[in-house]
Image (cartoon, rainbow, N blue to C red):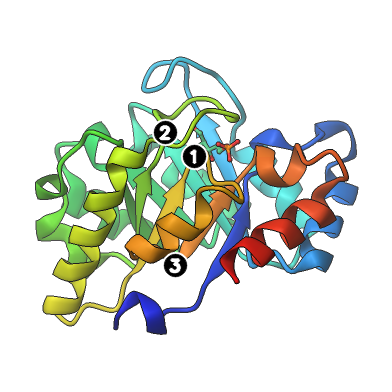
Amino acid sequence: MSAAKRAVQLVPSILSADFGCLERELAAAAAAGADRFQVDIMDGHFVPNISMGPMFVAATRRFTTLPIETHLMVSRPEQWVTSCAQAGANVIIVHAEATVHLHSLLASIRKAGAQPAVALNPDSPLALIEEALDQVALVLLMTVEPGFGGQAFISSVLPKIARLRQVLDARGLVCDIEVDGGIEPSTIAEARAAGANIFVAGSAVFGHPQGATAGVNTLRAALG
Ligand code: DX5
């Protein structure tokens, strides 16, 4: 199903939220029309930052009824699948670069009761995931090097987004393309035009000077 037909979704990343008032931040983003939330789990090894663990998935679960996707930026993703699913993750995103057993890792996510998804860093080739495209509901193409919010969008990923959309459509696969990193009003439209339909945004939402409501509304407006 082409990008034009796949529903557009906005996914605030809680990495940029004020953890001291997480419930209020999530409520504001949800009321403004966020479709789901992303919880970024980082181990300080796969990425040069340590962020949060499955407890933040559980906290987010307590504060919202929206779907939660957990982005595992960790070297041993297989260690975290069950705890994230039990904490309430609806989608679990693992990096193809973090495993040599992608097939069984994706199967373990399904077995844990969550939807499997796979991510690629900006310079990782689509060839890493071509054999797994029929096993995932979503492919996340990172538009920054993972580890931190507030980075600049890497526009050289745009052709990769377009190529992936062509591959998915040619194979008749129903699969969302999500982008994550540097998504803001000035970049979201070109990512959409390239073929993405799900947009993760941290600083553009929770770092917006007028708050999360304005952040979500501004991104929606930029999508037209
Ligand atoms: C980065 C995370 C992203 C990040 C996005 O490693 O995976 O989800 O929170 O932040 P922004 O939208 O500020 O680039």
Q: Estimate how packed mark 2 is, as few (under 14), some (14 to 19) or many (20 or more) residues with alpha carbons within 10 Å.
A: many
Q: Are marks 1 and 2 in contact (CB under 8 Å)?
A: yes
Q: Vertically, is 135 above or below 39? A: below
Q: Is residue 29 above or below residue 209?
A: below
Q: Residue at x 54, y 25 (%)?
A: 148
In the rendering, which numbered label is found on residue 181? 1
Report the image quarter containing ligand 1: top right
Question: What's the residue at 69%, 35% (across, down)?
Answer: 16
In the image, residue 156 lies at what x, y percent? 28, 39
Q: What mark, if any, has residue 201 been given in the picture?
A: none
Q: Picture coordinates of residue 80 (x, y %)?
A: 45, 39
Query: Which amino acid does the dot numbered 2 rest on?
Result: Val
Mark 1 CB near ligand 1 (8 Å cut): yes
- Name the residue: 82% across, 34% down: 18
In the picture of the structure, the residue carrying the numbered disc 2 is 144
Name the image quarter holding residue 64: bottom right
Counting residues from the start of the chain, the first of labels 1 and 2 encountered is 2
The answer to whether the residue labelled 3 contacts the one labelled 1, judged by CB atoms less than 8 Å apart, is no
Q: Which residue is mark 3?
A: 197
